[in-house]
Amino acid sequence: MANLGSRQRMEGKSIKYQLPNLRASKTSLKIKQILEQEKNIIPGFPAALQQMDMKSLEEEYKALQGDKSGEVEYFQSLDETINGMKGILDPVKCQCGLEYNLKLDGEAMDIS
């Protein structure tokens, strides 16, 4: 019986030492699986994209970034135009003879 307890302790220590190796193997297996998945994704890309080299892809990425900055410029310009219109007070005469003052103030147009 005493021999059985000693044997279990030795097996426990053995398992304790094997645990990091098992974790490393598990991580290695996950990495291999991810790489295999990535290899399977590439054939799904259009042929032209598969044949592009890194330099071409970088140029394409820079072009997309340029489009993005152009878009940001457009929205900034639009915002400036809207802010410029906020101070305008414009009288408008209705066909019925009444006169209204239109003023763009904040987020809404005020008609008084």
Image (tube, helix red, strand yellow):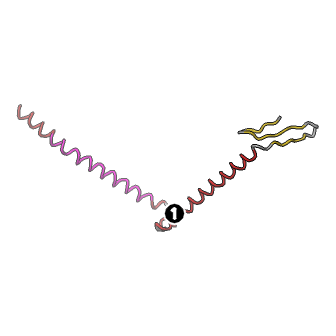
Give x and y (percent) for residue 12.
Answer: 16, 38
Report the label total: 1
* Residue at the image point whose x is 30% and y is 49% from the top: 27
- Position of residue 16 relative to residue 56, above or below, is above
24 left or right of 11 in image: right
Q: Residue at x 51, y 63 (%)?
A: 46
Query: Is 39 placed left or right of 71 in the picture?
Result: left
Q: Nearer the viewer, residue 95 or 27?
A: 95
Name which residue type carries label 1.
Answer: Pro
Q: Residue at x 18, y 44 (%)?
A: 17
Horizontal and vertical percent for residue 57? Answer: 50, 64
Q: Is residue 62 above or below residue 80?
A: below
Mark 1, other Cα within 10 Å: few <14 / some 14–19 / many ≥20? few
Q: Residue at x 5, y 35 (%)?
A: 3
- In the rendered structure, the answer to whether residue 6 lies left or right of residue 35 reads left
Q: In what quadrant of the picture does the N terminus appear?
A: top left
Residue furthest toward the front? 87
Write down the quadrant of residue 111 in the picture: top right
Residue 1 on the magenta span: no
Q: Which residues are magenta?
A: 13-41
Furthest-top residue in view?
1
Q: Position of residue 72 (x, y in %)?
A: 62, 53
Q: Is residue 22 magenta?
A: yes
| Image quarter of the C terminus | top right
Task: Please state if 77 lies on the left or on the right of 4 as rendered.
Answer: right
Mark 1 lies on a secondary structure that is loop
> For the stretch drawn in magenta, what is the main secondary structure?
helix
Indicate whether 36 appears above or below 110: below
The residue labelled by disc 1 is 46
Q: Position of residue 86 (x, y in %)?
A: 75, 43
